[in-house]
Amino acid sequence: MRVVAGSARGLKLVPPDGDRVRPTLDRVREALFNIIGPDLPGAAFLDLYAGSGANGIEALSRGAARAVFVDNHPESQACIRKNLASTKLEERGQLTRNRLPEEMGRIGGTYDVIFADPPYNFTDYEALLVGIDRAGLLAAGGRVILEHASKQDLPERAGRLERVRERRYGKTTLAFYA
């Protein structure tokens, strides 16, 4: 696993030990950031279920002003800290520990891009989207991107968010909401 582009391009990132975290594949992350890249300079990025922090770190590397990493697991938190330090991006990254989607309202702030990669056994995408909407986390003109198993069906609409795009990469799909 590595940073694909930007100021930290090519630097290796370490995932948490074991199989609890399933990092976004480099090719999927590269495709994602090719789509959202023009929106990143100066953006606020929220990385939900952050795991290793690879997606938020990629956003910072490509010019996001700040990234907030949300993960409830202590090992993931330690891994994110390590990866932020090794990429020298820790000044623009903030970690928070919240249970999702239950504690969505405790995150605070607004974000131009919200990325969520819940565990593959996660099923309540509607609650996640409604939580983002109710907490007012998405900035005007922003978007939410959910990474999920391609075999899983996600809602067309949840709260005020509507699916506007979907891209499939083998067993992984990215769903875009605005």
Image (cartoon, rainbow, N blue to C red):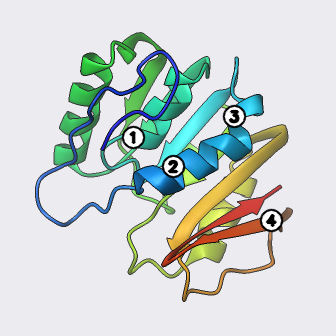
Looking at numbered disc 4 in the image, what kind of residue is underneath it? Arg
Q: Amino acid at mark 2?
A: Arg
Decide: few, some or many residues near mark 3? Use Cα within 10 Å; few <14, some 14-19, many ≥20.
Answer: some
Residue wearing tag 2: 29
Element type at mark 3: helix
Where disc 1 sits, the SS reads helix
Secondary structure under badge 2? helix
Q: Is residue 95 above or below residue 114?
A: above
Location of residue 51 in the rendering, given as x and y in whole percent from the top left corner: 32, 50
Inter-mark Cα distance, 2 to 1? 9 Å
Q: Are marks 2 and 1 in contact (CB under 8 Å)?
A: yes
* Residue that protrudes farthest toward the left in the picture: 17
Mark before the other along the chain sequence, 2 or 1 = 2
Residue topped by disc 4? 165
- The spot of residue 137 in percent (x, y) is 69, 43
Residue 76, above or below 60: below
Disc 3 to disc 1: CB gap under 8 Å: no
N-term mark: 3 or 2: 2
Question: To which quarter of the image does residue 152 belong?
Answer: bottom right
Q: Which residue is mark 1?
A: 54
The residue mark sitting in front, 2 or 1, is 2
| Residue at (24, 45) in percent of width and height | 76
Secondary structure at badge 4 equals strand
Q: Is residue 70 above or below residue 43?
A: below
Residue 166 location in percent, x, y? 73, 69
Q: Looking at the image, is 165 positioned above or below residue 157?
A: above
Q: Which mark is residue 37?
A: 3
Q: What amino acid type is highlighted by mark number 3?
A: Gly
Q: What residue is drawn where x is 27% and y is 60%?
A: 21
